[in-house]
Image (cartoon, grey):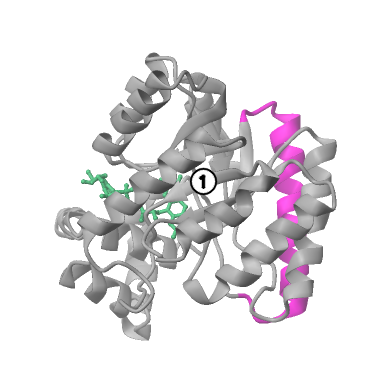
Amino acid sequence: MSALRSLILAAADSSRMQRFVRRYGFRLGAARFVAGESLDAAVPVLRRLNDQGLLTNTTLLGEGVSDEAETRAVVDAYREVLDRIHAEALRTNVALKLTHLGLSIDEEVARCNLAELVEQAAQLGNFVRIDMEESRHVDATLRIYRRLREDGHENVGAVLQAYLFRAEEDLAALLPLAPNLRLVKGAYLEPPEIAYPRKADVDAAYVRLLETSLRADGFTAVATHDETLIEHAISFADERGIPKERFQFQMLYGVRSRLQLDLARRGFDVLVATPYGPEWYRYLMRRLAERPANVLFLLRNLVRA
Ligand SMILES: Cc1cc2nc3c(=O)[nH]c(=O)nc-3n(C[C@H](O)[C@H](O)[C@H](O)COP(=O)(O)OP(=O)(O)OC[C@H]3O[C@@H](n4cnc5c(N)ncnc54)[C@H](O)[C@@H]3O)c2cc1C
């Protein structure tokens, strides 16, 4: 992991930094990565992406909720999101974080909140992806995913992070469920005792996860902007006759937009993860840490403003 990446992720916790970025950040840079501060602002963005031939998911930004009543408000907000997607006939599903639904308070609270949303999504023919957060939440998140699948919910998926040593074992344990899995490199600050510090090792682990997942039953969401990995997925699937319906590419709103369109034109399903909401600070900091050049982008806007 680059020193700059660690520095940005560590600085994200500073309250001074938060105050400064929250005050100026949306106008100066967050708008590149976030579809708006409200659902009303996000809907036209989702529609435009759909019109360009891209699938989308959306997320009400937020995480680490510590008050149970607040998690109910989050559930209500997501119920509205699901209804709105249906009413507007968007090709959009939902991705959410379990700590937004109460995982840091109590696993059962988060599971019940999620089950309610997954049921509503099923009634509307929609799908819910459970994002993966810091390593301390991985066990509970995978337990909840497994429980939902065992309870008969098919319209729910999980995420595995290639930087974690444990990811390959987690994948092997999930494969009997024919899981719908999004594979990512991993966006958090994790210690070298549990996660590969070197990018080359993360990339190699990603290839192993990708090949195992594509070869198995289930569905693989190849969530990366790394063109080498994307082309590897395409040739691997091609050589083994794995149909295009069994995988899709996923990228973030505001990142490598041309590549998103190129892949869609080549006939692949491409989903653009398009979050919204006033709680964009931590999301923005992770995007800056992934590509420290994004900090320059923000600073340039600051100078121009
Ligand atoms: C759809 C989606 C969902 C995700 N969900 C999760 C999740 O649930 N949990 C989790 O831990 N992580 C998640 N991530 C983030 C992921 O873990 C990585 O941090 C992120 O995708 C950057 O890694 P990369 O695979 O693109 O490869 P990298 O090697 O980091 O980047 C490859 C190239 O992509 C471009 N790029 C990458 N990131 C950026 C950026 N922020 N701004 C501009 N250009 C960039 C650059 O050109 C870079 O050279 C998700 C990512 C995507 C795309």
How many residues crowd around disc 1 within 10 Å: few (fewer than 14), some, or many (20 or more)?
Answer: many
Classify 92 as above or below 266: below
Residue occupying the point 36% across, 74% down: 190
- Locate the N terminus by quadrant: bottom left
The image position of residue 159, as x and y in percent, is 53, 53
Q: Nearer the viewer, residue 24 or 62?
A: 62
Residue 194 image-quadrant placement: bottom left
Q: Position of residue 181 (x, y in %)?
A: 56, 45
Q: Residue at 63% across / 75% down in the picture?
A: 65
Q: Residue at x 69, y 65 (%)?
A: 143
Please, what is the three-letter code of the amino acid marked with disc 1?
A: Arg
Q: Position of residue 49 (x, y in %)?
A: 48, 28
Secondary structure mostly seen in magenta is: helix
Q: Quadrant of the C terminus?
A: bottom left
**Residue range corresponding to the magenta coloring:** 65-91
Residue identifier under label 1: 182
35 part of magenta stretch: no
